[in-house]
Image (cartoon, rainbow, N blue to C red):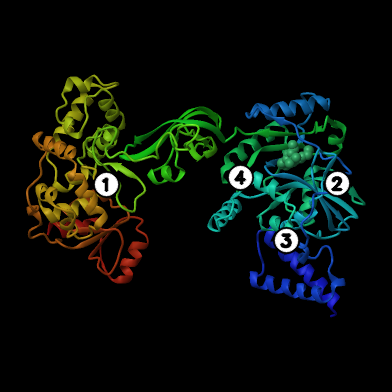
Amino acid sequence: MDAAERAAALRREIEQHNHAYYVLDAPVVPDAEYDRLFRELQAIEAEHAQLRTEDSPTQRVGGKPLPGFPPLRHVVPMLSIRTETDTEASGALAFDTRIRGLSGLGESDPPVEYVAELKFDGLAINLRYEDGILVRAATRGDGETGEDVTQNIRTVRRIPLRLKGDAPPVLEVRGEVFISRPDFERYNARQRALGRPTLVNPRNGAAGSIRQLDPAIAAERPLSFYAYGLGESRGWDVPTTHGGLLDALAAFGLPVCEYRAVVQGAAGLIDFHARIREARDALPFDIDGVVYKVNSLALQQRLGFVSREPRWAVAHKYPAEEALTTVEAIEVQVGRTGAITPVARLAPVFVGGVTVTNATLHNEAEARRKDVRVGDTVIVRRAGDVIPEVVSVVLARRPARDLIGDEPLHSAFELPKTCPVCGSAVERPEDEAIARCSGGLFCPAQRKQALLHFAGRRAMDIEGLGDRIVEQLVDHALVRTPADLYTLGLPAVVNLERMAERSAANILAAIAQSKATTLARFIFALGIRNVGEATAKDLARHFGNLDALMGADADCLQQVPDVGPIVAASVARFFAEPHNIEVIGQLRAAGVSWPQGEPAAVVGSPIAGKTFVLTGTLPELTRDEAKDMIEALGGKVAGSVSKKTDYVVAGAEAGSKLDKAQALGLSILDEKQFRELISS
Ligand code: IVH
């Protein structure tokens, strides 16, 4: 093989890899192999200058900086597109109605066929291929004349320098150059790391890159491209539909966006609009709407255009997801679990389809990183159903203290030391982003949550005290802390909405009954952060009484098996908050009590210290009941089978745990054998 043949073969192979990598997103060779082919081609071309062709992949970044972009007249004008600003389904309906009217279609005629596409947010480009080779690329300009940006466009890896297959003598392809969001983030992160300027947003980044006079700069920018239309073509059998055209462009190796559909009538358009609205946030690039085009090119021709805008196409927008507004105050909100979230109160602004007056700053670190201050102009974003958030501050618009100095009027955000709702201490455990109010039992913001947890089946087990009732008890100020439950009287409860006398009495009975509990249940019921049921049992077993637990410091708490520094710290914090101690005192005064010391039953128990695993459905006992029985007798229940398991209690449809137990040769019991064992 001579040098010319080898160079041609290398070019073909490299273009194939480019297509696989940049268009199909499915590379077939490792980068190192690609680099090797590339260097071999460069070497041949360096040695034989006559072999350096225009379509060679080595020529993507070959050009020298230009003094300016020469104007380039479009053979077929580049049209603009009408925008439908009604962002609801009615916008799509209006377009279809217009098309049907213009086409003289009556109500009984079949639906019009459309292609629905995305409206990309970048820069429109015309690519001219002659005999399959990219010869020129131009911006839209005024639609008649654009700028010749061929050098920069050659640097876009996704744009083939040579078309695949049987390309016609002339083919002009139209599409959008843009920057994807992940590429944008990566590029900016790298720029920041190098202390270089970042791009403001993907759209400006794409447009700005194409307008760089030095192609070496454009080459560094992560530009993408999607084809969506046709310019001039010669010697080509143009498909009869727009959908067919897009398929043909894809077959030539051009990137065409997967999110496109051939749909029928207004219903099809509305459906596409709704589907893309849902998918919008997950797309790797920004769009500001979708585009509908009449599918039949013959019908397109008949419909024609008015003043640079075709009648056969429309862009259907979505509500803008970002808007500018000003910060009126920064406050903190206390969530149901005590999480403290800084929130910016905003001058009302319409964004993402609703009027927004608050936006989350997530947490202290985020608020400081974004450095949002009162009086600032900020970009707010509300995408889909997500909580509105402050994206960034427009620093250029930050009000200064006076006309000379540039001291800001307001200082940076600081987390309050005490909870704005209840005054308890605010704590932020090390390594955690979220600060919390430590007044779990006392804080009004956490009341409902605390009460529901307290009454829960595995906690104080107050039957009938569910969501609806807790809601009302708190809203009517009948109950503030769990201790107040024990002072409720019948008249107050009967007065609640939809409450029969009988159910009121039942609830009061359940509350009274809950007074006799166990230490483990009581500890769990307190709702201490990071203390689940198992930890509550460990703590109860270890300390034996509440006062010892309340008096324990973090070191002492870590002596408890399975209690690490995080749990120890949150237990210590909980009992350090006087408000919580006060509520515990009230609970005890109300008569809440538990057996003192170790449960007597455990002494002489046949299963003390034994580990059980429960699997499958038992005929009579629920899993919780079986667990309670085992634990009452000093046994432990584990979640998975191991060599340390003493007994496996298996019911119907026991699965892999049973298989494993058999494999390990463990004792396997059914419910009857289990009952016999514990009563022995
Ligand atoms: S077709 C039919 N299709 O929108 C008229 N344009 O205002 C020719 N755009 O300059 C445009 N996505 O930059 C078409 N799927 C899409 C598009 C799209 C984005 C841009 C394009 C054009 C502008 C029209």
Which residue in the protein does label 3 denote? 19
Which residue in the protein does label 2 denote? 72
**Which mark is in front, 1 or 2?**
2
Query: What residue do we see at 19% from left, 29% from top?
Result: 506
Query: What residue do we see at 16% from left, 36% from top?
Result: 583
Which residue in the protein does label 1 denote? 529
Against 340, residue 107 (above or below) is: above
Which residue in the protein does label 4 denote? 201
**Which image quarter has ligand 1?**
top right
User: Disc 3 residue type?
Assistant: His
Disc 4 on helix, strand or loop?
loop
Taking the view exactly as shown, the residue that stands out farthest to the right is: 235
User: Disc 4 residue type?
Assistant: Asn
Residue 116 occupies which quadrant of the picture? top right
Q: Quadrant of the C terminus?
A: bottom left
The CA distance from mark 4 to mark 1 is: 41 Å
Work out whether mark 4 precedes mark 1 in sequence or the reverse, and give the earlier one: 4
**Which mark is in front, 4 or 1?**
4
Residue 148 location (% of width, % of height): 82, 49
The CA distance from mark 4 to mark 3 is: 27 Å
Residue 53 occupies which quadrant of the picture? bottom right
